[in-house]
Amino acid sequence: MHKIIKSLILAFTAFSMGCTKDADIKLPDYVPTLTVHSYISPKDSGMIVYVNLTKSAYSNNFIDLNNVTNATVKVSNGAISKTLAFVPAARADELSFYYIDSMDFKIEAGKTYTLNISTPDGKAATATTTVPQVVPDNTLEYHLVKTQFGDSVYHLKFTFFDPAGQDDYYKFGAYILEIDTTTDELNTSSNEEYQTYFSSDGNLITATIEAYRSSSFLQPEQIRVMDFRIMHVTREYYLYQLSIQNGGGGPFREPSVTFTNISGGVGVFAAYNYDQIFIRL
């Protein structure tokens, strides 16, 4: 029986090889799509919007970022609409962007903002986001642990009240700053974590993170400061960042879909707000 099956397989393989021929298939032309990236906050000095075009998976041009330089970019809070100014990139491998200063257009907590982008060739994209309120820190405790290599690890424990009646998303950040008091030069290290809460509305949240500082000796003119933040971010902010994290891991990882809230394009338009504490270390 095994000999019969083997003979049939060999015969089928030979027949299949004899029937194959090269296929000449014309692939459809690739049509680029607008990509939009912008995060807004009342704490920022201005609003930045990056506008680019997607690339074909078969493109071998890794330098050109497909900056869109002729778009009309507008932002509105429902009552006032403003057009952002274009800021060109210095080189082909750098990003250009569109910008408006906070003195000309103020971002406020609790308000909903709409972003509209259009190009002369008919492309259009739009998105909305609502700026969250500041969630204040109630307590912050930390202690320093020295590693065997002399590096500093700060263990931080903090609490805050999660607002009731809504799904809230948070990003915790601890930035260790070394400041030269004579030149105002700044060296920064940082550690950030994402966490999200759904079932704890109105309750007191306790969370922990670690912040790292490589070993270095402070000069008499230097001071070391910790900039700690509880960032309250929108749902689209959280989902986009989460999808980016899940999409990493190299060529052998399962493909994943990147979240987008851009209608007529891809990318993200999201908002955040934060409470900030400075600690002299």
Image (cartoon, rainbow, N blue to C red):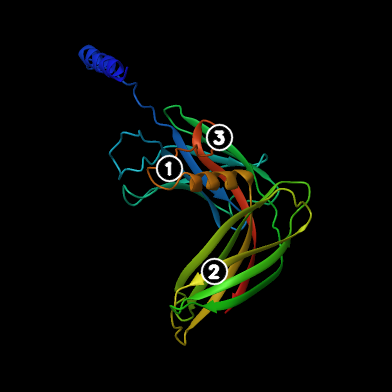
Earlier residue among tags 1 and 2: 2
Q: Give the residue at x 42% y 27%.
A: 121
Between 180 and 116, the residue placed more toward the observer is 180
Between 186 and 106, the residue placed more toward the observer is 186
Earlier residue among tags 3 and 1: 3
Which secondary structure, mark 3?
A: strand
Residue on which disc 1 sits: 253
Residue 111: percent from the left, percent from the top?
69, 46
Seen in the image, is 251 located left or right of residue 207?
A: left
Residue placed farthest to the front in the image? 1
Q: Of tags 1 and 2, which is closer to the observer?
A: 1
Visible in this render: residue 84?
Answer: no
Q: Identify residue type, mark 1.
A: Arg
Which secondary structure, mark 1?
A: loop
Q: Identify residue type, mark 3.
A: Thr
Q: Give the residue at x 46% y 83%.
A: 218
User: Spatial distance from mark 2 to mark 3, Cα to Cα?
Assistant: 37 Å
Residue on which disc 3 sits: 126
Residue on which disc 2 sits: 211
Residue placed farthest to the bottom in the image? 220
Residue 155: percent from the left, percent from the top?
59, 71
Q: How crowded is mark 2: few (under 14 residues within 10 Å), some or many (20 or more)?
A: many
Where does the N terminus fall, quadrant-wise?
top left
Q: Identify residue type, mark 2.
A: Ala
